[in-house]
């Protein structure tokens, strides 16, 4: 299992975009799979800090990324 530390919205956006492309999906397809708007997918991939958490979690689930926490 790969582990990636995400500390900024931009880093999360880059991860989502890379995984989407790895899966051969365009933004519209990902939005459909995650049941969110195309606009939210675009905002996430651009690292917009105001994206809704529910939408973020739906996108991560749709592309097979598990969000885990770890105490520092």
Image (tube, grey):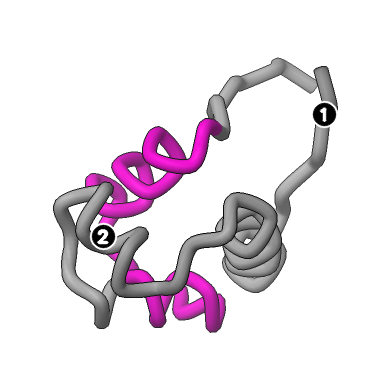
Residue drawn 70% across the image and 17% down it? 70
Indicate the quadrant where residue 5 lies: top right
Indicate the quadrant where residue 60 lies: top left
- Nearer to us in this view, 31 or 53: 31
Q: Quadrant of the N terminus?
A: top right
Disc 2 and disc 1 in contact, CB within 8 angstroms: no
- Nearer to us in this view, 33 or 44: 33
Circle 1 residues within 10 Å: few <14, some 14–19, many ≥20: few
Residue drawn 23% across the image and 46% down it? 54
Asked whether residue 8 is in view, the answer is no
Return the x and y of residue 71 as percentages of the image width and height: 71, 16
Return the x and y of residue 56 as percentages of the image width and height: 37, 51
Task: Classify residue 2 as left or right of residue 12.
Answer: right
Indicate the quadrant where residue 37 lies: bottom left
Mark sitting on residue 3: 1
Task: Classify residue 53 as left or right of residue 61.
Answer: left
Q: For mark 2, give the secondary structure.
A: loop
* Above/below status of 53 relative to 62: below
From the image, give the main secondary structure of the stretch colored magenta: helix
Report the residue marked by disc 2.
Answer: 52
Q: For mark 1, give the secondary structure.
A: loop
Return the x and y of residue 29 as percentages of the image width and height: 32, 64
Residues drawn in magenta = 41-64
Q: Quadrant of the C terminus?
A: top right
Check if residue 45 falls in the magenta segment. Answer: yes
Residue drawn 45% across the image and 72% down it? 26
* Above/below status of 38 relative to 24: below
* Above/below status of 16 relative to 45: above
Residue drawn 68% across the image and 55% down it? 22
Circle 2 residues within 10 Å: few <14, some 14–19, many ≥20: few
């Amino acid at each position: 299992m790969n582990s990636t530390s995400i500390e900024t919205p931009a880093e999360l956006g880059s991860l989502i975009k890379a995984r989407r492309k790895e899966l051969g999906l365009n933004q519209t397809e990902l939005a459909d799979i995650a049941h969110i708007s195309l606009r939210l997918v675009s905002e996430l991939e651009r690292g917009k800090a105001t994206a809704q958490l529910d939408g973020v979690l739906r996108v991560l689930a749709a592309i097979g990324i598990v969000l885990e926490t770890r105490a520092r």
